[in-house]
Amino acid sequence: METKINEQTVKLDFSPNETTVAVLAVPPKETKKIVLLIHGFMSNKESETNLELTKRFLAKGIATVRLDLFGHGESSGPFQKLTLSRCLHQVEGLIAWIKEKGYEEISMVGSSFGGLIAIHTAAKHKDLISLALKCPVSNYPPLWHDRLGRGGMDGWKRDDLFTFIFDDQKARLEYSFYEDLLKANTYSDAAHIKTPTLIVHGDADDDVPVDQSIRLFDTLRLARPDKELVLISGADHGFEKPADFGQMIDKIENFVVAATKTS
């Protein structure tokens, strides 16, 4: 029998004049276990990954909460003022809200840019049950240099605004996004994460090089050895092939459920 999905949309204000929209999904039986799902750059809370994981975790008696990051989906914007710091503030607020709701065993799943957010969050929250990262960005500034080149980066800084097309959507991003990234030392934070962690990355990812996850894995193991890296052969950034997507979802589901059972 398919698990009935009971969802509640909430609007939360963690900063003045900024609203974060999230969806809390709970299984039929009351639980203290929950997974926070963080989508990627220019995605939203209704991503295919988030929805599939929600269905699977609910079937295992685990609640989920998925949010729209700043400038994405139904949360406040505008997108052009997006920064990592804004998103970290949102997630901090959401974790506090989750705990106020009575949830005690919190896991986290971050995809791509959401993985970057999850890494920095996990470094601060030692009580997380598990952390699963789907093709996470762990060193973002070089990716922008590779995409734009020296001239493009100079133009972005000069004009303070970069206009681009992403998944057939036109978007703008202020230079403060890049400047804010430079303040983050992701590998330094990762070295302090003791939470059991899984990384799933496709070795044909053209958006986030798999080398970043290999370095991240080695760094994560400095704190504790119970980290896992799964490289899916031929998989791209979006795990577009059904078999690749299924393998990625299975790995994350099994890892989080196992960690929850042993907590």
Image: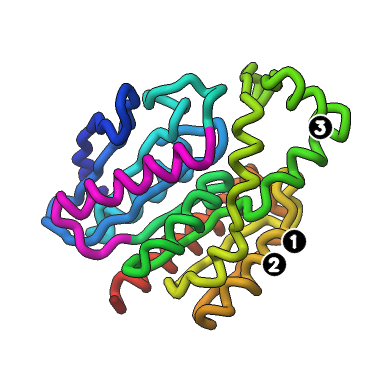
**Residue 94 is one of the magenta-drawn residues:** yes
In x, y percent, where is residue 88?
44, 45
Q: Which residues are magenta?
A: 83-106
The reply, left or right, for residue 183 in relation to residue 145 is left
| Mark 1 vs mark 3, CA separation in Å | 20 Å
Residue that numbered label 2 is attached to: 215
Disc 1 crowd, CA 10 A, few/some/many (<14, 14-19, 20+):
few
- Image quadrant containing the C terminus: bottom left
Give neighbour class at mark 2: few <14, some 14-19, many 20+ (Cα, 10 Å). Answer: few
State the SS at label 3: helix
Residue at (69% x, 52% y) in the render: 235
Q: Nearer the viewer, residue 138 or 244?
A: 138
101 or 161: which is nearer to us? 161
Residue 257 appears in the figure: no
Pointer 1 or 3: first along the chain: 3
Q: Which mark is residue 148?
A: 3
- N-terminal label among 3 and 2: 3
User: Outermost residue toward the left?
Assistant: 30
- Main SS, magenta region, reads helix
Amino acid bearing label 2: Arg
The kind of residue tagged 3 is Leu
190 lies left or right of 70: right
Q: Residues at badges 2 and 1 in contact (C-beta under 8 Å)? A: yes
Tell which of 170 and 156 is nearer to you.
156
| Kind of residue at badge 1 | Asp
Spatial separation of the CA atoms under disc 2 and disc 1? 6 Å
What's the CA distance linking mark 3 and mark 2? 24 Å
* Disc number for residue 211: 1
Q: Is residue 59 above or below residue 41?
A: below
Instruction: Name the residue located 75 percent from the left edge and 25 percent from the top edge.
Output: 156
